[in-house]
Amino acid sequence: MNIISKIAIVFLIIVGVMAFLQPADAADTDLILTPTAGIIENQGAVGAERIGSDTRIYGLFKLENFIEIGGQVIDKPQEPELGILLKTRLIAEGDGRPDIAVGIRGRSLYAVGSLSFYENTRGHFGLSDSSMGGIFFGIDHVINPHDVQIVDEEGNGMRLPRTRIMAEYLDEEFNFGARMNFTPELSVELSLIGLDKAKAGVHFNF
């Protein structure tokens, strides 16, 4: 692991601790690999993901209610790849119109629209340069907006955290996944990329 990856991991740990000290609500501004038109609701977000043999570490900060900026490092077997994360919302959702945003993800340019069309369900459609396959779309649905407590006949309880299921089409592949919010600040993601590669991620909001 090179020095850039080590610095990124230290940064993630520091901001992760800050996330637990400062309560915040989770914000879902991405699907599995594709962006949505949403902007993080809190001051920032950080995360670490394992995608196949690659490790991705990212950080995001909200400058205004309509713009977020950050960066990412992808530690690949060949060499690390640094990228910019930038998103600007041009139009806010309302009166039947979707959120519309443009941005940069890594080295890719994109435009995306997101619209709530059913309770706790949002659809997303975007255009990008060739590095993201040109066209991408997806859908996500929150199964339970709030934690659910399940108790058996003997009084033993189990908590089902807020769970968001996701499906998307990107670069001629379909991806499926779920993200669970164990606290308002901490979420864990498990996804399947193209039916032959796994993704696991931890995300913090602060």
Image: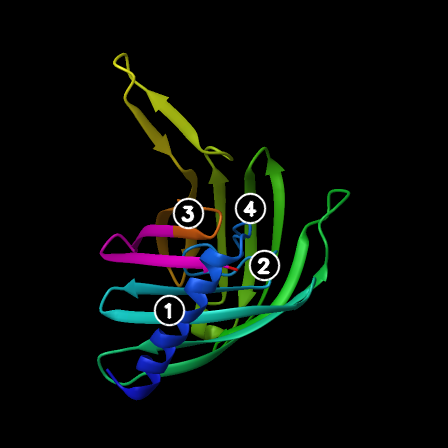
Judge by depth and name the residue closer to the eye, 201 or 111: 201
Disc on res. 123: 4
Q: How far apart are marks 3 and 1 (CA)?
A: 29 Å
Q: What residue type is labelled 1?
A: Ile
| Location of the N terminus (image quadrant) | bottom left
Q: Earlier in the sequence, mark 2 or mark 3?
A: 2
Q: How far apart are marks 1 and 4 (CA)?
A: 33 Å
CB under 8 Å between callouts 3 and 1?
A: no
Q: For mark 1, what is the residue?
A: 13
The residue sitting at 68% across, 50% down in the picture is: 98
Q: Mark 2: which secondary structure?
A: loop
Q: Which amino acid does label 2 sit on?
A: Ile
Q: Mark 1: which secondary structure?
A: helix
Q: For mark 3, what is the residue?
A: 167
Q: Which of marks 1 and 4 is in front?
A: 1
The residue sitting at 38% across, 71% down in the picture is: 57
Judge by depth and name the residue closer to the eye, 21 or 4: 21
| For residue 194, side relative to residue 103 (left or right) | left
Return the residue found at the far top: 153
Question: Magenta span: helix, strand or loop, mainly?
Answer: strand
* Residue 179 shows up from this direction: yes
Q: Earlier in the sequence, mark 1 or mark 4?
A: 1
Q: Where is residue 26 in the image (x, y as percent from the top left)?
A: 52, 51
CB under 8 Å between callouts 2 and 1?
A: no
Q: Which of marks 4 and 3 is nearer the N terminus?
A: 4
| For residue 37, side relative to residue 182 (left or right) | right
Q: Give the range drawn in magenta.
A: 188-205
The residue sitting at 29% across, 64% down in the picture is: 51
Q: For mark 2, what is the residue?
A: 40
Disc on res. 134: none
